[in-house]
């Protein structure tokens, strides 16, 4: 019993000497300068393809409207021909849209992975410089005085 009390007392002393910090990785991903630069870079990379998809969607809508409007006066064979063209174009659009979304998500994931890697290096550097014993990521609750997110954002902006 006395030994257990001594152990608890020693553990409390060591816990008081420990330095703990928290950083908010989601905030770093949303607000950091590299994240914003990556977002702009991706937007530029994918803007032409996005515009092409929008143009194709507009074309499909116009064809569908024209088919609806003209269907009463079209021959059966002409109506079927136009429906096939519209269906083929719509399938092509969906395929291109799926590929576009996959490529976009892949690029975003690449940029996020790169940013997270950089952020972890910065966190490690801050932890070593300021002698933190442990740095936790994305805690449910923490006292703002142990939050080093602003320091991480500032270091990433350099």
Image (cartoon, helix red, strand yellow):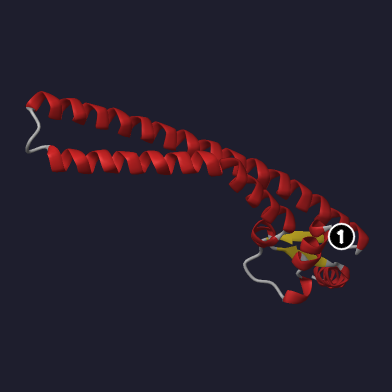
Q: How many residues crowd around disc 1 within 10 Å: few (fewer than 14), some, or many (20 or more)?
A: some
Placement of the N terminus among the 4 image quadrants: bottom right
Horizontal and vertical percent for residue 75? Answer: 7, 28
The part of the image, by quadrant, that contains residue 88 is top left
| Residue drawn at 85 percent across, 61 percent down | 133
Horizontal and vertical percent for residue 35? Answer: 68, 54
Say whether residue 57 is left or right of residue 42. Answer: left
Horizontal and vertical percent for residue 154? Answer: 81, 63
Placement of the C terminus among the 4 image quadrants: bottom right
The part of the image, by quadrant, that contains residue 80 is top left
| Residue drawn at 14 percent across, 43 percent down | 69
The front one of 68 and 145 is: 68
The front one of 144 and 98 is: 98
Q: Secondary structure at mark 1?
A: helix
- Determine whether 66 is above or below 131 in the image: above
Residue identifier under label 1:
126
Horizontal and vertical percent for residue 144? Answer: 73, 75
């Amino acid at each position: 019993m006395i030994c257990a009390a001594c152990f608890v007392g020693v553990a409390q002393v060591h816990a008081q000497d420990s330095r703990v910090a928290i950083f908010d990785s989601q905030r770093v991903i949303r607000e950091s300068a590299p994240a914003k630069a990556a977002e702009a870079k991706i937007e530029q990379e994918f803007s032409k393809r996005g515009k092409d998809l929008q143009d194709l969607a507009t074309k499909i809508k116009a064809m569908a409207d024209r088919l609806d409007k003209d269907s009463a006066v079209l021959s059966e064979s002409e109506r079927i021909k136009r429906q096939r063209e519209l269906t083929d174009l719509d399938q092509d659009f969906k395929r291109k849209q799926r590929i576009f979304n996959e490529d976009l998500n892949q690029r975003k994931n690449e940029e996020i992975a790169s940013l997270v890697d950089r952020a972890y290096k910065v966190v490690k550097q801050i932890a070593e410089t300021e002698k933190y014993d442990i740095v936790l990521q994305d805690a449910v609750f923490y006292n703002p005085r142990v939050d080093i997110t602003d320091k991480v954002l500032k270091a990433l902006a350099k």
